[in-house]
């Protein structure tokens, strides 16, 4: 029957998670039920295993990770009479094959870390199982041994029977038993103990306990021994290594008890030894596999974080230095030569990194993929971390030969250095990661030091990137409009739509803060469509308010990603038809750099829009170094001259070179029947010069800054009054 606490816990869990947990418990019960001495039926046994399965699942996802529940689960198996060795073997097999499969789906823990945690849970469960089984065995054996020794000192008439019974227990015991006097001289050993020490009785008998000192003895072992032989304690239990005769090490769980005579005086010491050498080696192997990368043999993320946590949380005034390495162009090697060659390259890189990080306090680890880290600790990491970064890049400088090819290996390194106790390991690694990408952006094959301001900007960019989709859904974007003015008569010709983001934390953000992020994520397409819809709707509204003054044109920017989007023409037509705005009242601005080297496939949608009557403006003209002859094949009707050509006109007298350049561009544009718009007009003298040079329209702070749409109507009404 399910206990109330268990029932409420099950009810609180999603059905899918509970079903997967029960399937895991079913597999487990079917595996070990045949080798379990229990009066329960298999379904009852499965219900008994369900809480243990739940504790393993919870431990798999717990933060911070703690393998103690698995140790308790191992002990619970022994308590449930699952003491056959096959029960442990089968349990470990079930956990290895099915725990992550059935219980690892929920949560955000990476798959690689789940597998590492699963291995540590196996380790802990095996330890708990062995500990419980050992304690059960030791209690039984110690009781038997005590009874035998007590019987040995019985009356003379029972001596023979007692001796026979004692010998049967003593010699037939599965664990090693030894008896020594209070001076430490060994007086009796059984066959099991003799086998533990190599099979020669002479190597054990007639020796003194004090001769079995080992360098790895725990500090308190011999203190406990002294207290026992002095009669100050009755027993103690420790883990102790011994040297065998051939020099190999025997690891044991040792229990030593004091035997007293009838008057309570200390007489002998009784030692019970369990050989744990193989189990210790198994634990060490499981620990190694859980903390080392299977491909390169380097410490993995788990072990690295243990070392990093210790380094950054130290309170002794020490410092640390971290180098975060990512190979440049590794994906291209994988794609061109295959993952097998990529793996061999990673192994070679790992060997080289290990060969240069050999100083005290240095370690190298593989985090995954082509990402490696090197950690150094000590009092002088300011200089040591720079030397370590130099050695890393130097180790990569020699080409790697794979299948007759010489591959050049380059890497970008982010370096973080500082005193311990100021940042968490997660903050340090994040800073190193950001800095590594800064080194990669600067050309790669170099290292950069962490910069808190650069970190903050990168974190802000990441936050803005992740917030963009929701911001569009929540309506956080709005549009400001900057007037376009006829240079001939000063009347308002139209306006350019400029999108802004009203961010809840950062306030109003200009397009330079988020348009590149939207381009990178692909959100620029829905955002661009929204801007087009809003701008066209606003233009139509202006027309209804200012019908006697002619239609006001609206300029909308198109990004390179929008140019490549197959639905550009259809979306534009749909927006115009829904609003009722004539195509001639819309001008789409495309940067010159976006059209450099453009083929006919890219120009086709622009030609279709131009044929409909939509104006196409070539924005930032003069910054893309395009061939002026290409203007004849581009479907543009407006050149928008970059402000860099007209800044010299703000001075008096105006720069004659700038005047000649602008005059030539205007003349060329007009000969191609293109209108010329100038942006960045800030003074009256500048506006007058541009008018004299024949420019058609202009925009800039001299006329008005970008603002709310009703300001455009006010400017138009002012024109009408004049």
Image (cartoon, grey):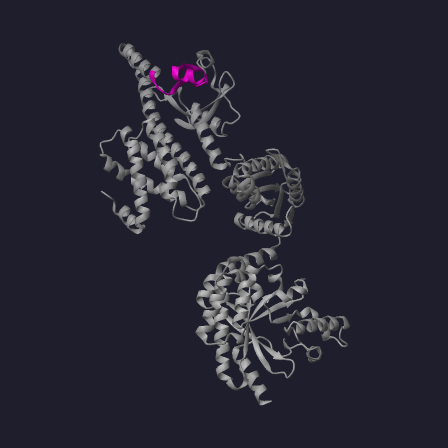
Rendering coords of residue 466 (x, y %): 49, 58
In the rendered view, does 709 fall on the left or right side of 259?
right
Q: Nearer the viewer, residue 237 or 231?
A: 237
Q: Nearer the viewer, residue 588 or 370?
A: 588
In the image, is residue 290 above or below residue 200?
A: below
Outermost residue toward the bottom in this view: 721
In the image, is residue 194 above or below residue 469?
A: above
In the rendered view, does 516 fall on the left or right side of 621?
left
Rendering coords of residue 545 (x, y %): 49, 84
Quarter-wise, where is residue 626 in the image?
bottom right
- Could you tell me how many numbered marks the image carries? 0
Is 455 included in the stretch rendered in magenta? no
In the rendered view, does 320 fall on the left or right side of 544?
right
Quarter-wise, where is residue 142 in the image?
top left
In the image, is residue 379 above or below residue 135?
A: below
Rendering coords of residue 265 (x, y %): 38, 21
The answer to whether residue 412 is seen in the rendering is yes
The answer to whether residue 477 is seen in the rendering is no
In the image, is residue 406 above or below residue 528?
A: above
Q: Nearer the viewer, residue 300 or 709?
A: 709
Q: Which residues are magenta?
A: 172-197
Rendering coords of residue 178 (x, y %): 40, 18
Image quarter hosting the N terminus: top left
Quarter-wise, where is residue 457 in the image?
bottom right
Image quarter hosting the C terminus: bottom right
């Amino acid at each position: 029957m399910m206990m109330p606490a268990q029932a409420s816990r099950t009810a609180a869990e999603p059905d899918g998670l509970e079903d997967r947990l029960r399937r895991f418990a079913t597999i487990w019960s079917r595996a070990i039920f045949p080798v379990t001495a229990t009066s329960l039926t298999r379904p009852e046994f499965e219900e008994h295993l369900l809480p243990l399965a739940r504790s393993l699942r919870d431990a798999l996802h717990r933060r911070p990770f703690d393998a103690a529940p698995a140790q308790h689960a191992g002990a619970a198996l022994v308590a449930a009479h699952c003491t056959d060795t096959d029960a442990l073997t089968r349990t470990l097999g079930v956990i290895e094959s099915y725990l992550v499969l059935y219980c690892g789906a929920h949560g955000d823990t990476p798959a690689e870390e789940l597998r590492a945690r699963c291995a540590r849970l196996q380790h802990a469960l095996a330890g708990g199982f062995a500990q419980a089984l050992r304690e059960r065995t030791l209690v039984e054996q110690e009781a038997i041994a005590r009874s035998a020794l007590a019987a040995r000192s019985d009356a003379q008439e029972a001596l023979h029977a007692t001796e026979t019974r004692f010998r049967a227990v003593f010699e037939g015991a599965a664990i090693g038993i030894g008896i020594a006097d209070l001076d430490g001289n060994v007086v009796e050993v059984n066959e099991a103990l003799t086998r533990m020490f190599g099979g020669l009785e002479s190597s054990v008998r007639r020796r003194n306990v004090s001769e079995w000192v080992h360098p790895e003895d725990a500090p308190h072992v011999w203190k406990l021994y002294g207290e026992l032989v002095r009669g100050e304690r009755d027993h103690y239990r420790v883990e102790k290594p011994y040297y065998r005769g051939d020099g190999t090490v025997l690891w044991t769980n040792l229990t030593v008890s004091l035997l007293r005579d009838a008057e309570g005086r200390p007489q002998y010491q009784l030692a019970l030894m369990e050989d744990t050498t193989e189990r210790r080696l198994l634990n060490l192997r499981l620990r190694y596999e859980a903390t080392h990368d299977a491909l390169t043999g380097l410490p993995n993320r788990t072990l690295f974080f243990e070392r990093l946590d210790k380094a950054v949380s130290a309170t002794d005034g020490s410092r640390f230095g971290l180098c975060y390495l990512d190979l440049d162009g590794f994906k291209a090697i994988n794609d061109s030569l295959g993952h097998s060659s990529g793996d061999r390259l990673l192994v070679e890189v790992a060997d080289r990194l290990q060969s240069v990080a050999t100083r005290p306090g240095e370690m190298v680890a593989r985090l995954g993929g082509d990402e490696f880290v090197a950690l150094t600790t000590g009092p002088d990491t300011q200089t040591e971390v720079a030397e370590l970064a130099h050695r890393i890049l130097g180790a990569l400088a020699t080409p790697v030969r794979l299948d007759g090819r010489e591959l050049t290996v380059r890497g970008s390194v982010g370096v973080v250095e500082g005193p311990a106790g100021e940042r968490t390991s997660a903050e340090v690694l994040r800073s190193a990661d950001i800095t590594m990408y800064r080194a990669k952006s600067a050309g790669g094959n170099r290292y950069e030091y962490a910069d808190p301001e650069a970190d903050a900007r990168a974190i802000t960019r990441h936050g803005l990137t992740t917030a963009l989709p929701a911001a569009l859904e929540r309506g956080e974007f709005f549009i400001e409009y900057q007037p376009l003015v006829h240079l001939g008569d000063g009347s308002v010709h139209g306006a350019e739509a400029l999108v802004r983001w009203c961010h809840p934390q950062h306030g109003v953000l200009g397009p330079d803060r988020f348009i590149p992020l939207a381009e990178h994520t692909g959100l620029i397409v829905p955002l661009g469509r929204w801007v087009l819809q809003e701008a066209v709707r606003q233009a139509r509204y202006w027309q209804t308010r200012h019908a006697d003054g002619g239609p006001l044109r609206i300029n909308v920017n198109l990004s390179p990603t929008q140019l490549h989007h197959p639905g550009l023409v259809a979306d534009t037509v749909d927006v115009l038809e829904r609003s009722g705005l004539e195509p001639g009242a819309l001008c789409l601005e495309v940067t010159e750099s976006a059209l450099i080297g453009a083929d006919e496939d890219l120009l086709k949608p622009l030609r279709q829009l131009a044929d409909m009557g939509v104006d196409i403006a070539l924005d930032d003209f003069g910054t893309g170094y395009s061939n002026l002859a290409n203007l004849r094949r581009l479907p543009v009707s407006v050149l928008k001259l970059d402000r860099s050509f007209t800044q010299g006109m703000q001075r008096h007298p105006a720069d004659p070179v700038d005047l000649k350049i602008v005059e030539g561009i205007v003349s060329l544009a007009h000969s191609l029947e293109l209108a010329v718009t100038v942006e960045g007009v800030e003074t009256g003298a500048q506006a007058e010069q541009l008018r004299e040079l024949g420019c058609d329209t202009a925009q800039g702070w001299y006329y008005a800054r970008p603002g709310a749409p009703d300001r455009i109507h006010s400017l138009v009404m002012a024109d009408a009054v004049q």
